[in-house]
């Protein structure tokens, strides 16, 4: 399986302490930008009840799900605190202003 | 080998006895408790605050279920003991459980005296002894109808005040000429009656109940003089009688109660009795301090200390009615060998009387101003000769020796052995000593370690002053719940500091108030954002990323990530054109569900986020603006059709509802605010369970607030009655602005009102016209910046990024 880097836009497209979505053949990916300027991408699907994490409040390197307040680490995709569960993380590359995410197997298959 | 200890009853006395026993003889007994009430040990002294709504059951639990488990105690809840077999040394419960004992403790408490008048067994006649009684009263109070309390003693008056706080029209019927005649002299009894009457409680003294009227169900009370008082609820609070029936059947010696010696032993040395059911030295007791003294004695005896003896002490009586301060101690009867010192301040409603014999205090009655009670009690207990300070004695310790009038001085002047907490018999030295030895810094810690102020709580102020004296600045008087894990400050402190330090951005708040995280969390950020919006309406730039998604997307997120859209329909009134526009939008965007809401609006559910701006653009063309159904802000004003159509309507309720809604829409509040205006007391708009409601009457407008019909259900409180629509609007806006400025984020109006106190709110909004107008003006100012329709802004392109994906990666593109 090979990963492929795909350009999705620029850093300026995402509000600081916010997120935007990317629709992909692998499902919705949420791309986050933290107060410190780090960028993370994870599946837009809370491990609890599938809530859209991209709509949550971003704090530190975590996001709080808008449906039932689970807190998910953007670095590991794991639920923090007493909750258990995790979402898939997606590799991100920042080149200057441009943002890339790496998509994998399904893209290959689709081709 | 462990011995078996069985306890019948699970009230405060046996609970306290077990605490002592576990401390001085841990592991000695295997303990089994049978409780006729189906619950754990709770603080019965605090039933009155539960009734008045100032506390709830969870807050008055003394021993939670975990405590019994941790201490290896078996608690049978809802088991009434039916028989004691003293030969076989067993007890048997109503549920068929038989348990053997080596030592048995009877703590069956007391029964309320039911006056055997005709109708005493009707539905709607209640007593006031336990939580079941309180729950029954709270249920009955929801009718907001009339209640009669028979008995003007401590319990009866607390019940009356509680029922009145719950919105009932209450009459107290008392046999004697003055209230609480066993604790108060006639002068104080008179002042008490006046204070209660000022609150709207009717008091009839020298009133002998002849019959309870009705037909199986209470309809009224008839007095011996022929007076009939209509009522749907009657509380019998005519006193209590020790519950000694079980002991009597078992053949133990009975007087007024179960007769015990000074070690709490009954006529059977293996059976002890304590609490309200016990009679010791010819006395039976109803106040908690002597009961706790019995508990201490019984525990010592069970632990093998033969020397422990119960000693009779006079206990001060305090009435737990918020805002009415009464203190009484000792003997206050007149007598030839007695003298008295009396201080009256009619304007302030203060009355103080000291009863002296041989230059020593033997009794004290205080009304309206009771802070010096502990000091007088101390002088009485020590039998101190007061002739040196006789001239100034009545003014209290602060005036002895001409010291400055410092509020802490009275407490500082108390000797170490002065009693602070009457319920638990805790003296000043024990409290200050424990604070120092254990490094206590919060009131809760002091309660846990010393028990001071842990029962009825009337000495909380004294304990706090002691903490202040002992700890100085290290004492944070209200050791509050922090807002979240990012700070040690509570909501109130944060709000205060935002204003005091002129903090005008979220980062400034976090920096100046030493937030522990770099950019807060999902709990504190929305709260801070609201506080800043509220306090600096013209200067603060709303922090979009600190709002929940609903307030960012101006729609309500649903479980599948779609949104619901509710357009504003002013006062719940719509038109053919509006309905047509909604129908067209539903068709055009294939919206799956359309539903009518509880707030008289139409909700379109299942709208895709990408479609929101286009949906709003179409709705906007028909004149719709955002209905803010997603906001911590003004939601809806429900109305009935009032004088426009209704044959009963007294005012233009629809017009007033629309006026309020047009005036207040767009404002942000700590939590959602729902309103209603009803055109007559039939109340078709259900205004009496709203955050703010109006009931129109012939003579004007009754403004209500602090209702709830969600997680909690609560009828509104009356703010006041006004004559004109303009006044009604001014009162409503002012009370909402007061709530906006003081409420904690996510705290609904009824909880804020409970915290701040209804009297205080009425004082500022109803009585103080200047304050009311200042609140009104601040609201009007903030509306200048708030009344912008978020839908039309977004339909014209604002926050575009919110509604569009950043990119769409197709299969082909991805595979290139």
Image (cartoon, coloured by chain):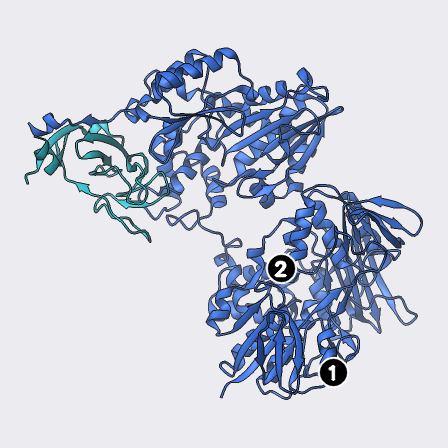
In this picture, is B194 found above or below A17? Answer: below
Instruction: Residue B251: give its label.
Output: 1
Q: Give how far across and how far down residue B111 sits, in percent.
A: 74, 66
- On the question of residue B153 being in view, the answer is yes
Please, what secondary structure does the residue beneath circle 2 have?
A: loop
Residue drawn at (88%, 69%), measured in percent from left and top?
B338
Relative to B596, does residue A3 appear above or below in the rendering?
below
Q: Can I make out residue B345 in this image?
A: no
Q: At which x and y percent is residue B380?
A: 75, 71
Q: Residues within 10 Å of mark 2 (few under 14, many from 20)?
A: some
Name the one closer to the observer, B278 or B205.
B278
**Nearer to me, B27 or B581:** B581
Q: Nearer the viewer, mark 2 or mark 1?
A: 1
> Which residue position is annotated with label 2?
B457
Q: CA distance from mark 2 to mark 1?
A: 39 Å
User: Measured along the vertical axis of the image, is residue B503 above or below residue B659?
Assistant: below
- Please tell me in which quadrant of the rendered image residue B791 appears: top left
| Residue in the image at 41% along x and 22% along y | B790
Asked whether disc 2 touches disc 1, contact meaning CB atoms under 8 Å apart, the reply is: no
**The chain shown in cyan is which?**
A
Q: Chain of mark 2?
A: B
Q: Colour of chain B?
A: blue
Side (left or right) of B82 relative to B284: left
Q: Which mark is residue B231?
A: none
Mark 1 residue crowding within 10 angstroms, few (<14) / some (14–19) / many (20+): some
> In screen coordinates, is B282 left or right of B47?
right
Q: In the image, residue B738 lies at what x, y percent?
A: 57, 34
């Amino acid at each position: 399986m090979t990963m492929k880097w795909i350009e999705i836009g620029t850093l300026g497209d995402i509000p600081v302490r916010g997120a935007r979505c990317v629709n992909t053949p692998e499902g919705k990916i949420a791309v986050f930008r933290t107060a410190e300027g780090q960028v993370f991408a994870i599946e837009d699907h809370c491990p609890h009840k599938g809530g859209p994490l991209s709509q949550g409040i971003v704090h530190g390197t975590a996001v709080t799900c808008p449906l039932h307040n689970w807190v998910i680490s953007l670095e590991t995709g794991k639920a923090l605190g007493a909750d258990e569960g995790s979402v898939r993380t997606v590799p991100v590359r920042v080149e200057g202003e441009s943002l890339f995410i790496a998509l994998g197997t399904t893209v290959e298959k689709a081709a | 080998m462990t011995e078996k200890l069985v306890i019948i009853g699970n009230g405060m006395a046996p609970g306290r006895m077990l605490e002592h026993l576990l401390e001085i003889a841990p592991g000695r007994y295997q303990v089994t408790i049978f409780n006729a009430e189906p619950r754990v040990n709770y603080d019965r002294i605090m039933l009155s605050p539960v009734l008045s709504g100032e506390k709830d059951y969870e807050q008055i639990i003394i021993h939670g279920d975990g405590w019994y488990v941790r201490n290896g105690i078996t608690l049978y809840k809802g088991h009434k003991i039916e028989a004691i077999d003293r030969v076989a040394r067993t007890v048997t419960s109503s549920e068929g459980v038989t348990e053997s004992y080596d030592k048995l403790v009877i703590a069956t408490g007391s029964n309320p005296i039911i006056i055997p008048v005709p109708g005493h067994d009707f539905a709607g006649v209640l007593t006031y002894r336990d939580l079941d009684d309180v729950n029954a009263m709270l249920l009955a109070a929801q009718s907001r109808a009339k209640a009669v309390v028979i008995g003007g003693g401590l319990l009866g008056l607390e019940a009356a005040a509680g029922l009145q706080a719950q919105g009932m029209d209450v009459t107290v019927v008392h046999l004697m000429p003055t209230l609480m005649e066993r604790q108060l002299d006639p002068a104080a009894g008179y002042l008490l009656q006046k204070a209660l009457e000022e609150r709207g409680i009717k008091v009839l003294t020298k009133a002998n109940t002849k019959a309870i009227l009705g037909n199986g169900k209470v309809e009224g009370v008839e007095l011996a003089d022929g007076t009939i008082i209509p009522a749907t609820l009657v509380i019998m609070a005519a006193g209590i009688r020790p519950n000694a029936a079980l002991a009597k059947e078992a053949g133990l010696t009975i007087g007024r109660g179960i007769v015990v010696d000074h070690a709490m032993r009954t006529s059977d040395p293996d059976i002890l009795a304590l609490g309200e059911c016990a009679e010791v030295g010819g006395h039976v007791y109803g106040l908690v301090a002597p009961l706790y003294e019995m508990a201490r004695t019984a525990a010592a005896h069970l632990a093998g200390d033969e020397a422990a003896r119960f000693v009779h002490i006079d206990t001060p009586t305090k009435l737990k009615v918020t805002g009415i301060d009464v203190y009484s101690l000792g003997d206050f009867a007149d007598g030839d060998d007695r003298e008295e010192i009396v201080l009256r301040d009619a304007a302030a409603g203060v009355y103080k009387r000291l009863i002296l014999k041989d230059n020593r205090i033997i009794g004290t009655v205080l009304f309206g101003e009771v802070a010096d009670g502990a000091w007088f009690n101390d002088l009485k207990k020590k039998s101190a000769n007061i002739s040196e300070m006789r001239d100034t004695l009545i003014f209290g310790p602060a005036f002895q020796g001409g010291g400055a009038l410092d509020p802490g001085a009275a407490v500082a002047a108390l000797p170490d052995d002065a009693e602070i907490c009457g319920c638990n018999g805790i003296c000043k030295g024990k409290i200050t000593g424990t604070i120092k030895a254990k490094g206590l810094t919060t009131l809760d810690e002091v309660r846990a370690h010393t028990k001071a102020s842990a029962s009825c709580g009337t000495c909380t102020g004294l304990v706090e002053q002691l903490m202040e004296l002992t700890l100085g600045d290290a004492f944070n008087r209200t050791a509050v719940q922090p807002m979240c894990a990012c700070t040690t400050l509570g909501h109130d402190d944060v709000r205060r500091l935002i204003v005091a330090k002129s903090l005008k951005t979220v980062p400034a708040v976090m920096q100046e108030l030493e937030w522990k995280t770099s950019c807060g969390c999902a709990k504190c950020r929305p709260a801070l954002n609201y506080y800043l919006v509220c306090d600096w309406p013209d200067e603060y730039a709303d922090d979009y990323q600190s709002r929940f998604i609903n307030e960012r997307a101006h729609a309500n997120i649903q479980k599948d990530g779609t949104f619901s859209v509710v357009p504003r329909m002013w006062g719940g009134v719509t038109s053919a054109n509006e309905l047509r526009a909604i129908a067209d939008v539903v068709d055009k965007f294939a919206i799956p569900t359309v539903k009518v809401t509880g707030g008289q609006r139409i909700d379109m559910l299942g709208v895709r986020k990408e479609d929101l701006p286009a949906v709003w653009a179409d709705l906007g063309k028909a004149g719709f603006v955002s209905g803010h159904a997603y906001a911590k802000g003004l939601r809806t004003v429900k109305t009935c059709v009032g004088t426009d159509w209704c044959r009963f309507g007294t005012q233009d309720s629809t017009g007033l509802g629309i006026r309020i809604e047009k005036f207040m829409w767009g404002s942000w509040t700590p939590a959602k605010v729902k309103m209603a205006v009803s055109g007559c007391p039939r109340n078709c708009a259900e205004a009496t369970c709203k955050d703010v409601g109006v009931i129109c009457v012939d003579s004007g407008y009754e403004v209500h607030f602090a209702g709830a019909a969600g997680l909690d259900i609560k009828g509104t409180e009356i703010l006041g009655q006004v004559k004109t629509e303009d006044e009604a609007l001014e009162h409503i806006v002012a009370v909402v602005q007061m709530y906006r400025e003081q409420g904690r984020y996510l705290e609904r109006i009824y909880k804020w009102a409970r915290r701040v106190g209804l009297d205080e709110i009425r004082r500022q909004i109803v009585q103080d016209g200047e304050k009311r107008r200042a609140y009104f003006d601040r609201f009007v100012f903030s509306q200048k910046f708030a009344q912008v329709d978020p839908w039309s802004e977004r339909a014209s392109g604002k926050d575009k990024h919110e509604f569009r994906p950043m990119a769409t990666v197709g299969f082909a593109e991805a595979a290139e």
